Image (spheres, rainbow, N blue to C red):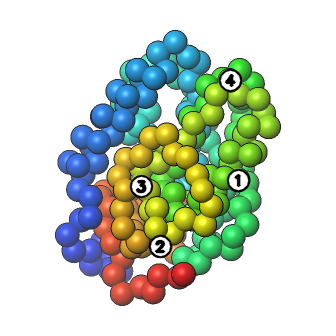
């Protein structure tokens, strides 16, 4: 990919495919008798979300919201902002929020509070990647694809300065300082 050369993937396309199938079947079992609404958190979750939704053999609803996260650099501003909101009524729905990565946990905590106020029947969280070493707040994640070490990763929807989201696997971005 232009700009940077990525070495060995941290998580390959094949590993991703297998894990997402497993998650999809687990979610389908858990939501069999429910009215599932999957909400993708953009932009980062767009690739994972489309794979996961297709791996859940249930007649589910989909919706999206766009949140601001790290801006152009990797450093979090701390404050999470909703740039574009969901369009569907959450009341009575069984909502599953789909994230690309949980890092500090601030986004998840913010979304939990915001979405709970809309009185869903239930609210759970699913993330492709979990970076538990950088947590600033305690969070519960119901479905985790992969737990990864404290490295800055790109691909599969995840970006660095808005690039590399289309890389079809997860790679570590080397030689870039990790902000504390
Ligand atoms: P939070 O710190 O848990 O609130 O995560 C905020 C957001 O930071 C995530 O949704 C990602 O968009 C972004 N982020 C955190 N770690 C990484 C990474 O390693 N690569 C790319 N984006 C990341
Ligand atoms: Mg994100």
x 37%, y 47%: residue: 145
Which of the pair 69/178 is nearer the observer?
A: 178
Residue denoted by label 1 = 110
- Mark 4 or 2, closer to the camera: 4
Q: N-terminal of the two: label 4 or label 2?
A: 4
The percent coordinates of residue 95 (x first, y second) are: 61, 31
Please identify the quarter of the rendering in which residue 157 is found.
bottom left
**Is residue 163 in sight in this rendering?**
no
x 61%, y 25%: residue: 94
Q: Is mark 1 within 8 Å of ligand 1?
A: yes
Q: N-terminal of the two: label 2 or label 1?
A: 1
Residue denoted by label 3 = 129
Contact, CB < 8 Å: mark 3 with mark 2? no
The percent coordinates of residue 26 (x first, y second) are: 37, 28
**Label 2 secondary element:** loop
Q: Where, quadrant-wise, is the C terminus in this rendering?
A: bottom right
**Label 3 secondary element:** strand
Q: Is mark 3 within 8 Å of ligand 1?
A: yes
Please identify the quarter of the rendering in which residue 121 is found.
top right
Residue denoted by label 4 = 121
């Amino acid at each position: 990919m232009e700009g940077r050369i990525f070495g060995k993937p941290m998580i390959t396309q094949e590993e991703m495919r297998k894990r997402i199938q497993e998650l999809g079947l687990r979610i389908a079992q858990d939501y069999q008798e429910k009215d599932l609404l999957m909400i993708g958190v953009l932009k980062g979750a767009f690739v994972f979300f489309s794979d996961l939704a297709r791996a859940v053999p249930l007649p589910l609803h989909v919706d999206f919201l766009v949140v601001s996260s790290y801006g152009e650099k990797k450093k979090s501003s701390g404050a999470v902002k909703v740039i574009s909101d969901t369009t569907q009524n959450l009341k009575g729905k069984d909502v599953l929020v789909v994230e690309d990565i949980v890092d500090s946990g601030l986004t998840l905590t913010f979304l939990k509070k915001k979405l709970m106020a809309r009185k869903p029947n239930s609210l759970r969280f699913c993330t492709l990647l979990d970076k538990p070493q950088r947590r600033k707040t305690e969070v519960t994640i119901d479905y985790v694809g992969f737990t990864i070490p404290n490295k800055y990763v790109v691909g599969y929807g995840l970006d660095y300065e808005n690039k590399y989201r289309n890389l079809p696997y997860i790679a570590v971005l080397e030689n870039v300082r990790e902000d504390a």
